[in-house]
Amino acid sequence: MEFNVAVLPGDGVGPEVMTQALSVLQAVGEKFGHSFLYHDGLIGGVAIDTLGTALSPETLQMCKQSDAVLLGAVGGFKWDSPQAKIHPEDGLLALRKGLRLFANLRPVKIFPMLVDSANLKPEVIRGVDLVVVRELTGGLYFGQPKRQWRTPKGRQAVDTLAYSEAEIERILRVGFELARSRRKKLTSVDKANVLQSSRLWRQIAIEMSADYPDVELQHMLVDACAMRFIQRPAEFDVLVTENMFGDILTDEASMLAGSMGMLPSASLAGIPKGITFGMYEPIHGSAPSRSGQDVANPIATILSVAMMLRYSFSLETEARTIEDAVLAILEQGYRTYDIMSEGRTKVGTKEMGDLIAEKVKG
Ligand code: IPM
Ligand code: MG
């Protein structure tokens, strides 16, 4: 089969981890007889510097015409000023919105051999295997009004947390369906003790649970969830939540897996059944202080490629092949700096990518 993949390496360590992810994808293609045609595009800071915009209409169009999108990371010190007119992150948000990628799946799984190198106690993180379904095109990130202005009494700013019933329903459906295909536990995370949008969210979740009698639905306030994540994380199966709650909780959850450098993500335009258009990216940022040093962990991006094969191309065996290769290389003791522990072999970005690609070839 032949697939068209839009490739947006972005800023910081993005291009370095992307190069490794593409070499692993190439290895899968050779092994299973698929060809992947890459279409390169600019996004983020590099797009601001070259085109004057964080996402050009041409790049968006190119992504729309592809079968899936692979993204590295955006952002960096250079574009960080709060007074800047455009930010690299604007490009990512415009891309998510423009491609209607409302469902962001962030699986958090602890690899058994990394239990000892994580910051948290082994008995807390052992057995963690959860997925956060983050709503990605609404909520606090996109609600209007959203602006800053001056008043006689000083400066003022507003952001808005708004959701329609249709937006809540479609993201909850992703949560319910995913829970149904896993351990059948769904935790809907909200702030219903304070926010109107959360009360609507919770009410719709209760109504929808009638369609899913086989799924155990639980509601949890976002602050309690943050605590539970580091207290008893292994109890979670699927979580579903608002855009910004999901952003914050998944950075926290990454510590359960040892490092942000281990976590992939899929941003989908529909329920993950059959073939779904999507964008795939590591959950970590551009890590500008690490860029250009060949140290960044490419595993999150490599595992994002596996998610692309699974959800957008329906190539389950190929996806598993990548995941098994990652597992095998970790098993052999190879570690990037972020997951390094005593007695293991420290490798850089390229070497880690090469090892995994070789393992895929078998
Ligand atoms: C993420 C990132 C982005 C977000 C930033 C880069 C805009 O933190 O994907 O989690 O906040 O969604
Ligand atoms: Mg984030």
Image (tube, rainbow, N blue to C red):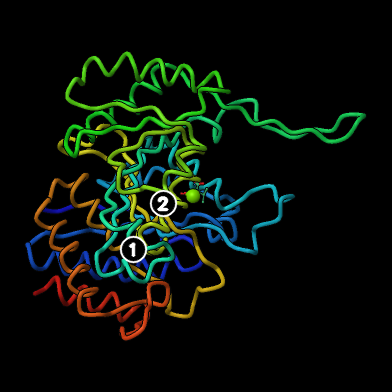
Q: Amino acid at mark 1?
A: Pro
Measuring 38% from the left and 57% from the top, which residue is drawn there? 256
Q: CA distance from mark 1 to mark 2?
A: 15 Å
Regarding mark 2 in the picture, which secondary structure is present there? Answer: helix
Q: Which residue is mark 2?
A: 253
Measuring 35% from the left and 62% from the top, which residue is drawn there? 262
Residue 359: where, in percent of width, then height? 15, 75
Regarding mark 1 in the picture, which secondary structure is present there? Answer: helix
Picture quarter with the C terminus:
bottom left
Q: Is residue 20 above or below residue 192?
A: below
Q: Is residue 271 above or below residue 324?
A: above
Query: Which quarter of the figure has residue 342?
Result: bottom left
Left or right: residue 308 versus residue 262 is left
Tell me which label, 1 or 2, sits earlier in the chain: 1
Residue 76: where, in percent of width, then height? 59, 62
Whether pointer 1 and pointer 2 mark residues with C-beta atoms closer than 8 Å, the reply is no
Residue 317: where, in percent of width, then height? 9, 55
Q: Which residue is mark 1?
A: 122
Q: Amino acid at mark 2?
A: Ala
